[in-house]
Structure formats: structure tokens, C-alpha cells
């Protein structure tokens, strides 16, 4: 049962291969059709001189030969004469009726099919003639390849033409090839040539069809893109036109102020004792009237449910039609067109309700009402239509502005929090490292100060003695000098660390200055190491450095470069320690830092033997806010900021090499 299903499936697939879809037919009759016409014209231009040469070559010696050779030369010359005449006619017809006027007409399509038939049958006939003197079927192979490679035909056409040509070939050589063994061999070779031409035809047809569809798809996408760009330009033009013709309307992004500004314009153009704008609120399914003006006074906002069809405002919005009434007593009927008022109980007699449209979308209604009958002419209606268009754009812009403003504020707040968190994290590591660095010289200072105080006491005791020992006094004085030197040495060291910290935090942003890269690397290695030690006392790492001392100083922003080094070195320390903790301490964390002086640049490498970077992480590594650290331990800004500093601010490169489970090496390139 399954075997029959498989057969049915294959039959359906085969039928689908030969059957053309409507789009394929249209492409064949238009794009491919004209391409075939062009190729037929080229084929004709090539075939005419070639056939003429063959005709002349074989015809010149026809009279001088006899027997089989005479028959062979006669048949070949006649065949090429037919091809010469046929291709001349085809070339002229195609050029005059199709190619020159650029039309894909019926005559040209007929010429294409005639060309296919001529080539295939001509190849079969010439091959049959050749069998009189040789055993080769080269002409049939060549014409099959030409048809398969040059002319684009749907599979069903190609199948019919090639099978028909093979049958003609089969019977033609049967009449001229008298050697049974050669005949069978050539008939089999003819099948191969036919199959080859057929396969080439199928492949090229499908390829050209797919390329044409892709081209159309690209053109369609380009049209859509142009349309989108056109819409953007149209919106821009709308804003510019609105700026020129409705400057007062767009001077405010407050809906209430917009309505009041529109009212001033309306009141100058027509009698609008009552003016209001209703905005559609899809969530509540109501028309909300935030600001209604009656007799130049602002009324309390209210809303109308869209289910209340007895209100003219709801009717106008739901039906997307203008409501124009100049005598409410006669035309209002069952509708209650008047809006609630607080000033007067008088009913408006002339009422206009127009839909507010923006980009084919109804966003609300605009209304002008007068206590006089016949207050509005066509001129007034047109004026209100123009103001309605401007009002819709202004209101949509106001709403969009508020939404975008809220979004921008949220984004800025989030970004500031993340940047602050990143700075605090970096500052924490920096502070811990500096605290550890300063602690050592301060301990020395304190210890030597205590020793000096004790020596002063000894000196006082010795001086107060009846017979002071001069040698002892000199020794104490010498020790005091040594202690003073040590205190001064370690005090300078602490001062250097503090100055380095101040330079790191207070340097002018973006100001490049000659900087010793190796010195910054050494400082940042110590800061990162002690920062990790301050966070986790179990942290330890082997540090290997190979710094090229010929680098000298280069022009960089030292604070920014130091931040890059500190970020990458801290990450390296973190990753090696995490790997060690994950495998229960059976790992020796190693950090390797090197620098190299090259002709036009310098390179800095920072390598760790941590877990490496997985494939799914590599593409996102420099993406802002992406981090692999647990929540609360990383902001995802370190490498992103480092990339900006190196690539954008210093015109350098920041790359990495990694192997999962083995190592990660960041390579920083800076131009000299």
C-alpha cells in the first residue's frame, strides 16, 4: 500500500514539474519570450555565415565527386542551403517585427519555435547524411547542446521537441548507416545526446525562471521601499505644508492648546459659536471630547459611547461621512446633534461634523456649530475640511510626540541606570585595587614611624645618661635617617598611586596625550588583580607579561585606554577564577599580557586560560547590554564601551581569538 502511495506521489511531482504555474506562463510569454527572441536573433546572425561557408565548401566539390561522396556532399550542401535561407528569413522577421520595435509578438514566438525545430531536425538530417561517409553523430550532439544551452523552453515543450528530434534522428540514420553495429551504437549515443540536451534545457529553464522570479521579487521590494520612502517624504511634505498653512495649529503639542488654536482659526473663517474635536479611544470604544469651546469659553471634557447612534458625532464617525445641517429644526429629526453645554440652553441650528482622517484612518471628528440657520456655505465646509486635515496631522503628531517622549525618557533613565551601574562596578574594582595598593606603603610608613619614635626615645635616654656612648648615638641617628628614607619612599609610592587614581578619574575626556602604554598595562594588571582579591580572598592567578619596551609613548586618551585594559583584564581574571571554581580548584588560572611594536601600529594582547567564548555568544559579544554574568554582576556595557573607545575614538581594532574550554585572547591594535 505504501509503495502505491510513493508512486502516486512521484507521479504528482512529475506532473507538477511539467505543468506551468500561472506566474511561470506569464514569465514565459513576456520576459523569457523576449530573451528567446534576442537569442534567436544572435543565433541567426551566427548561423547565416556559418551555413553559407558550409554550403560553399561542400558545393564547390559536388561536381567533381561521384558515388556516395557525391550524395554526401549534395545532402550537406542542400541542408545548409535550407538552414541559410531559413535563418535569413527568421532573422529578418525577428528583427523587423519584434526586436527593433521591442515587442514580444506572435510572429517572433513562431520564429523561436521554428528555430528550435530547424536546429534539431537540421542536426538529425546532417548527421544522417554524414553516416554515408563517417560514423560520427557530432552535428546532432552540437545542435542538441545549442538548443539546450541557448533557447529557454518550458519542460513540456523541451521534452516534446527533443523526443521528436530523436525519433527523426533514429529513422534518418537508419536509412543511411548500413553497418548494424555502428547504427545501434549511434542510436544509443543519440539517446545520450538527447538526454544531455534535455537536462541542460530543464536546468537552464529552471535557473532562468528562478532568477526572473527573484529579480521580480527584488523589484517588488524596491517598489515597496520606494513607496515607503515616498510615504516618509509625503509625511515630511505634510509637515512642511502644515508648517506653512497651519503654523498656529502646530505651535503646540498639547491637545487642549491645539483645539484652542484651531478654534481661533475657525472663528476667523466662519461662525463657530460651538467648536469641538472628538478623539477616538479604541480601548474604551468612545469618542472623547477633551476640550469643547462655546462662546469662547472652555467647557468640561466628556465622552460619547460609539453605541449611541442618536448623536451626530457618533453617526459621523461610525459611517465615516460628513454631516452638514443648516436647519437643525428640519434635518436633525431623531438625532440629537447638540453637545451638552453649560452656558446656554439654546440649540445650534447649523451643524457641521467632519471625520478626522490621517493616512486613511479615522481618528475622530471635528465640529463647528452656529446658532443661526444657513450659517455654512460650501466655502465654509471646504475651509473646515482643510483645517480638519491639518488638525488630524497635528493631533497625531502630538500623540506620537508624547508617546515617543515617554519612551525616550524611559530609555534614557534605563541607560543612565545601566551606565551608572557599570561605572560603579568598575569603580568598585578600581577602589578595591587602589585600597590594597595604598595599604602596603602606609603599613611601611606607620611601621617606620613607630621605629623612629622608639629610636628617638633611645636617643633621649642615651643623651640624658652621664656618659653617653657616641657610637650608639651615631648608630641611632643613622637608623633614623634610613627610616626617614623608607618613610619618604613609601609615601611617594602612595602619592603616586593616588595621583594615578586622580588621573584616571579626572582626566579631560577625549583629550589625547603622549602615554606610556606599558605603564598603564602594569597599573591596570595590579588594579584588576587586587580588585578581584578584595572581592574574593581565594582568588589567585599567575600573571605573565611580555611588554615591548621599544613602544615608547603614543597619542591616546589615557583614561579611556586604561578603562579598556581594566575591563578586559578584569573579565579575564573573572573567567579563569570561574573555571577554577567550576572544576573544584583543579585548574591553574593564568593571565598573559603582551605588547608588540610594529611599523605603523602597536598591538596589545590579553590572554586567559578560562572557558573561552561559545559560538552563540561570539556574535553578541560587543552588543550593548549583553552579558554572560549572573544577574546583578554585569551590565553588558564593558566590552561595548571598549569597542567604541578603540575602534571609533582611536581608529584602532579590537578582535579576539578563542577556543571553547581552552582560552580567550583579545588583541587590541592602536595606530601610532
Image (tube, helix red, strand yellow):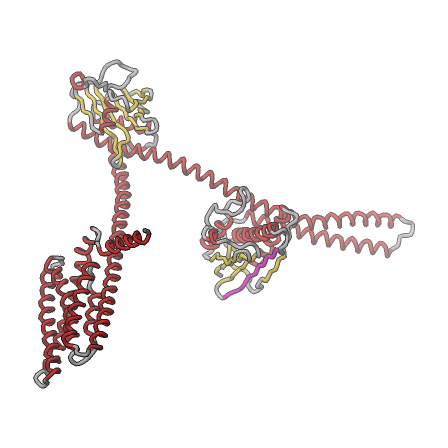
Horizontal side, residue 559 vs residue 288: left or right: right
Is residue 597 rendered magenta in the image?
A: yes
Q: Depth check: 104 or 199 in front?
A: 199
Residue 381 in which image quadrant:
top left
Residue 646 is at least partly visible in this image:
yes
Q: Hey, which residue is sitting farthest bottom in the picture?
A: 64
Q: Depth check: 6 or 166 in front?
A: 6
Relative to 75, does residue 461 appear above or below in the rendering?
Answer: above
Horizontal side, residue 228 vs residue 176: left or right: right
Horizontal side, residue 371 vs residue 256: left or right: left
Identify which residue is drawn at 78% across, 53% down: 480
Q: Depth check: 670 or 483 in front?
A: 670
Relative to 560, does residue 600 appear above or below in the rendering?
Answer: below
How far from the left and from the top, in percent, is residue 342? 30, 15
Q: Main secondary structure of the magenta part?
A: strand
Q: Hey, which residue is sitting farthest front in the picture?
A: 1
How far from the left and from the top, in percent, is residue 68? 12, 82
Residue 311 in which image quadrant:
top left
Identify which residue is drawn at 22% across, 16% down: 347
Is residue 603 rendered magenta in the image?
A: no
Q: Number of labelled discs?
A: 0
Relative to 290, does residue 35 appear above or below in the rendering?
Answer: below
Residue 126 is at least partly visible in this image:
no
How far from the left and from the top, in percent, is residue 102? 13, 58
Relative to 93, does residue 455 appear above or below in the rendering?
Answer: above
How far from the left and from the top, in percent, is residue 138? 21, 74
Residues in magenta? Answer: 588-598
Amino acid at each position: 500500500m505504501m509503495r502505491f502511495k510513493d508512486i502516486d506521489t512521484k507521479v504528482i511531482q512529475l506532473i507538477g514539474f511539467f505543468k506551468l504555474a500561472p506566474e511561470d506562463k506569464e514569465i514565459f510569454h513576456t520576459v523569457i519570450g523576449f530573451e528567446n527572441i534576442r537569442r534567436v536573433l544572435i543565433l541567426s546572425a551566427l548561423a547565416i555565415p556559418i551555413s553559407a561557408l558550409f554550403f560553399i565548401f561542400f558545393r564547390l566539390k559536388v561536381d567533381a565527386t561521384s558515388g556516395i561522396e557525391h550524395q554526401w556532399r549534395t545532402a550537406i550542401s542542400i541542408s545548409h542551403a535550407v538552414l541559410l535561407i531559413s535563418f535569413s528569413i527568421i532573422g529578418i522577421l525577428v528583427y523587423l517585427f519584434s526586436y527593433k520595435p521591442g515587442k514580444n509578438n506572435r510572429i517572433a514566438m513562431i520564429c523561436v519555435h521554428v528555430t528550435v525545430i530547424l536546429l534539431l531536425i537540421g542536426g538529425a538530417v546532417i548527421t544522417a547524411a554524414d553516416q554515408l561517409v563517417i560514423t560520427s553523430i557530432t552535428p546532432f550532439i552540437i545542435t542538441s547542446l545549442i538548443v539546450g544551452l541557448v533557447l529557454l523552453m518550458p519542460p513540456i515543450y523541451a521534452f516534446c521537441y527533443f523526443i521528436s528530434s530523436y525519433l527523426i534522428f533514429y529513422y534518418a540514420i537508419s536509412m543511411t548507416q548500413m553497418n548494424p553495429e555502428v547504427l545501434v551504437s549511434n542510436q544509443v549515443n543519440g539517446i545520450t545526446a538527447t538526454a544531455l540536451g534535455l537536462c541542460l534545457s530543464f536546468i537552464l529553464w529552471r535557473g532562468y525562471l528562478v532568477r526572473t522570479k527573484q529579480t521580480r521579487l527584488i523589484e517588488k521590494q524596491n517598489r515597496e521601499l520606494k513607496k515607503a520612502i515616498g510615504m516618509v517624504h509625503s509625511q515630511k511634505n505634510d509637515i512642511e505644508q502644515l508648517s506653512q498653512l497651519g503654523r498656529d495649529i502646530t505651535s503646540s503639542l498639547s491637545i487642549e492648546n491645539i483645539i484652542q488654536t484651531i478654534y481661533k482659526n475657525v472663528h476667523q473663517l466662519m461662525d463657530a459659536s460651538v467648536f469641538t474635536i472628538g478623539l477616538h479611544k479604541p480601548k474604551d470604544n468612545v469618542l472623547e471630547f477633551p476640550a469643547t469651546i462655546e462662546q469662547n469659553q472652555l467647557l468640561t471634557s466628556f465622552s460619547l459611547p460609539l453605541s449611541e447612534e442618536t448623536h451626530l458625532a457618533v453617526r459621523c464617525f461610525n459611517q465615516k461621512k460628513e454631516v452638514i445641517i443648516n436647519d437643525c429644526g428640519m434635518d436633525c429629526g431623531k438625532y440629537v446633534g447638540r453637545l451638552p453645554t453649560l452656558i446656554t440652553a439654546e440649540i445650534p441650528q447649523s451643524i457641521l461634523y467632519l471625520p478626522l482622517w490621517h493616512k486613511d484612518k479615522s481618528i475622530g471628528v471635528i465640529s463647528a456649530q452656529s446658532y443661526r440657520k444657513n450659517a455654512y456655505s460650501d466655502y465654509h465646509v471646504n475651509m473646515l475640511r482643510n483645517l480638519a486635515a491639518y488638525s488630524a496631522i497635528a493631533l497625531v503628531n502630538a500623540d506620537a510626540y508624547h508617546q515617543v517622549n515617554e519612551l525616550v525618557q524611559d530609555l534614557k533613565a534605563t541607560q543612565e541606570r545601566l551606565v551608572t551601574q557599570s561605572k560603579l562596578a568598575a569603580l568598585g574594582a578600581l577602589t578595591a585595587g587602589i585600597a590594597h595598593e595604598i595599604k602596603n606603603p602606609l603599613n611601611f610608613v606607620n611601621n617606620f614611624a613607630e621605629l623612629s619614635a622608639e629610636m628617638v626615645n633611645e636617643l633621649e635616654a642615651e643623651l640624658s645618661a652621664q656618659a653617653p656612648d657616641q657610637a650608639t648615638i651615631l648608630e641611632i641617628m643613622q637608623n633614623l635617617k634610613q627610616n626617614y628614607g623608607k618613610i619618604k619612599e613609601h609615601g611617594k609610592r602612595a602619592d603616586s598611586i593616588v595621583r594615578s587614581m586622580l588621573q584616571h578619574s579626572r582626566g579631560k575626556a577625549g583629550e589625547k596625550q603622549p602615554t606610556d602604554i606599558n605603564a598603564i598595562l602594569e597599573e591596570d594588571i595590579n588594579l584588576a588583580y587586587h580588585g578581584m582579591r578584595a572581592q574574593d580572598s581565594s582568588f589567585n592567578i599567575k600573571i605573565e607579561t611580555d611588554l615591548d619596551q621599544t613602544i615608547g609613548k603614543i597619542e591616546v586618551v589615557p583614561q579611556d585606554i586604561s578603562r579598556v585594559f581594566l575591563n578586559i583584564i578584569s573579565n579575564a581574571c573573572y573567567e579563569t577564577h570561574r573555571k577554577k571554581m567550576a572544576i573544584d580548584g583543579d585548574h591553574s588560572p593564568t593571565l598573559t599580557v603582551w605588547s608588540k611594536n610594529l611599523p605603523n601600529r602597536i598591538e596589545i594582547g590579553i590572554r586567559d586560560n578560562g572557558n573561552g567564548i561559545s559560538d552563540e555568544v561570539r556574535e553578541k559579544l560587543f552588543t550593548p547590554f549583553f552579558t554572560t554574568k549572573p544577574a546583578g554582576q554585569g551590565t553588558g556595557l564593558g566590552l561595548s564601551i571598549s569597542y567604541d573607545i578603540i575602534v571609533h575614538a582611536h581608529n584602532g581594532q579590537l578582535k579576539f581569538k578563542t577556543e571553547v574550554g581552552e582560552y580567550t585572547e583579545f588583541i587590541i591594535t592602536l595606530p601610532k
